[in-house]
Image (spheres, rainbow, N blue to C red):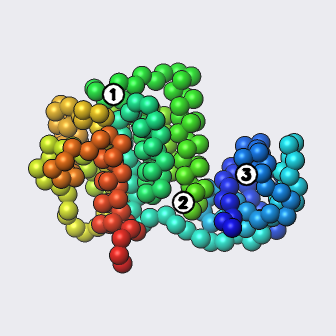
């Protein structure tokens, strides 16, 4: 039986017993229906994890006993900051989930010329919390011990100006070349557009900001497929995926 992995923002101290916050407690008691004596693994996003045992499970409180911290790391040596235009429906949720599984370090949802989604104020804050929770769940499932940073929806031009990386790539199906240069970078900024792609003006702006074209071949991929294919290629080329 697989032992559940649970994220908590609480400080974890080896060898202590502690009640969990409401979020993880409700997940353990109501969704997983775990019982006292069951084993689980806790992590707080700072690296490593803690084997633990449930001491008490009730609707009001879940208490755990922590074991010794395990210095397990599953992060890629390649730090990827994904800047992606916000897409409609559940496509953005899919990208956040799968990009987390593929090891993205940071993710910035962006407004572009062809972005059809409009998020402001409380609605934008609610959507950000939703995406962050999707990333937490993806980390619990895939074994990551550090959460990717997910920022609130932002402007493309500001992202281009403020993002720092050893190598900068802009993905678009009109590209004739990609960046296969060596030596291997330690960090990459990857820009991906919305349905319909980035406009010619946006591509030109990105290129002036130091972004080089990256192509995924002759087929036009959907907005939720393209970033995941690109992430897998980059992780295989310079990260921790593929044969070693």
Q: Is residue 164 visible?
A: no
Residue 178 percent coordinates (x, y)? 18, 55
Distance Cα–Cα, label 3 vs label 2: 17 Å
Q: Which image quarter is the C terminus in? A: bottom left
What residue is pinned by disc 3?
32
**CB of mark 1 within 8 Å of CB of mark 3?**
no
Is 9 rendered above or below residue 55?
Answer: above
- The residue tagged 1 is 115
Give the residue drawn at x 40%, y 68%.
240
The residue depicted at 55 percent of the width and 29 percent of the height is 125
| Crowd around label 3: few <14 · some 14–19 · many ≥20 (10 Å) | few
Identified at 35% across, 55% down, the residue is 231
- Pick whichever, 99 or 69, lies toward us: 99
Secondary element at tag 3: loop
Q: Residue furthest left?
A: 176
The numbered mark, 1 or 3, whose residue comes first in the sequence reads 3
Residue that mark 2 sits on: 142
Horizontal placement of 31 versus 121: left or right? Answer: right
In primary-sequence order, the first of circles 2 and 1 is 1
């Amino acid at each position: 039986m697989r032992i559940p992995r649970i994220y908590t923002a609480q400080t974890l101290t080896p060898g202590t017993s502690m009640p969990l916050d409401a979020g993880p407690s409700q997940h353990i008691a109501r969704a997983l229906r775990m019982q006292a004596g069951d084993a689980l693994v806790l992590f707080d996003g700072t690296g490593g994890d803690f084997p633990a045992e449930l001491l008490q499970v009730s609707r009001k409180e879940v208490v755990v006993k922590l074991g010794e911290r395990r210095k397990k790391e599953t992060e890629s040596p390649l730090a990827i900051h994904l800047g992606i235009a916000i897409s409609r429906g559940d496509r953005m949720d899919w990208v956040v989930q799968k990009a987390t599984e593929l090891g993205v370090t940071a993710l910035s949802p962006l407004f572009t010329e062809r972005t059809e989604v409009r998020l402001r104020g409380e609605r934008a804050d609610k959507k950000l919390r939703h995406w962050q929770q999707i990333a937490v769940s993806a980390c619990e499932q895939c074994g990551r011990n550090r959460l990717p940073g997910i920022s609130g929806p932002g402007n493309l031009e500001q992202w281009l100006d403020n993002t720092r990386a050893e190598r900068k790539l802009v993905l678009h199906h009109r590209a004739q070349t990609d960046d296969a240069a060596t030596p291997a970078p330690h960090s990459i900024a990857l820009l991906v557009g919305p349905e319909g792609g980035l406009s010619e003006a946006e591509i030109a702006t990105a290129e002036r900001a130091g972004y080089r074209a990256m192509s995924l071949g002759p087929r036009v991929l959907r907005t939720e497929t393209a970033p995941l294919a690109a992430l897998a290629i980059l992780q295989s080329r310079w990260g921790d995926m593929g044969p070693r």
